[in-house]
């Protein structure tokens, strides 16, 4: 009778160990999935931050370009334009594009929008 009890105890210990291993593996799987999801979100946020920065600098480039044409080259006379008219546009290969418009003429407001992939940033200047 005592041999049968010892076999039952050993059998139950093996089942308990197997159950513990399965529980630990399931917990590790969930932790791994959570960490993978977190890393993927961080990668997407980094890409978005890069696109925001590039779009901002594209808008800044367009603003600097139009100011140079107005004040240094004197090739653009703002009196020849109406509100909403495009002043300048450009495309920088591999990065994106920018568009500059005359938003208002009293006071003078120029708006430049930079677009990088599917992200847009705008700069407005007035004087």
Image (tube, grey):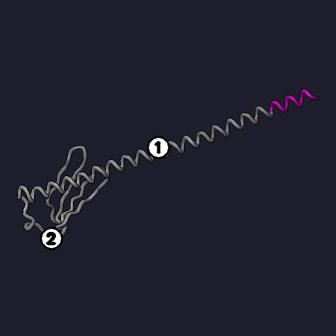
Q: CA distance from mark 1 to mark 2?
A: 48 Å
* Front residue of 110 and 23: 110
What secondary structure is found at the residue carrying circle 2? strand
Q: Residue at x 84, y 32 (%)?
A: 9
Query: Does 48 sit left or right of 113 as displayed?
Result: right
Where's residue 81, x and y in %? 11, 66
Q: Residue at x 7, y 66 (%)?
A: 80
What secondary structure is found at the residue carrying circle 1? helix
Q: Residues within 10 Å of mark 1 (few under 14, many from 20)?
A: few
Considering the whole magenta stretch, tell me its main secondary structure.
Answer: helix
Is residue 8 magenta-colored?
yes
Position of 44 relative to 16 (above/below): below
Q: Residue at x 18, y 55 (%)?
A: 62
Using the image, tell me which numbered label, if any, was put on residue 39: 1
Using the image, tell me which numbered label, if any, was put on residue 13: none
- The magenta segment is 1-11
Q: Which residue is mark 2?
A: 105
Splitting the image into 4 quarters, where does residue 17 fall? Answer: top right
């Amino acid at each position: 009778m005592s041999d049968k009890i010892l076999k039952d105890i050993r059998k139950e210990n093996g089942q308990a160990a197997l159950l513990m291993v399965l529980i630990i593996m399931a917990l590790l799987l969930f932790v791994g999935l959570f960490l993978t999801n977190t890393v993927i979100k961080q990668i997407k946020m980094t890409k978005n931050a890069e696109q925001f920065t590039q779009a901002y600098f594209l808008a800044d480039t367009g603003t600097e370009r139009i100011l140079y044409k107005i004040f240094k080259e004197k090739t653009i006379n703002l009196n020849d334009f109406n509100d909403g008219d495009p002043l300048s546009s450009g495309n920088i290969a591999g990065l994106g594009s920018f568009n500059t418009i005359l938003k208002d003429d009293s006071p003078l407001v120029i708006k430049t929008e930079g677009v990088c992939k599917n992200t847009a940033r705008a700069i407005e200047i007035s004087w």
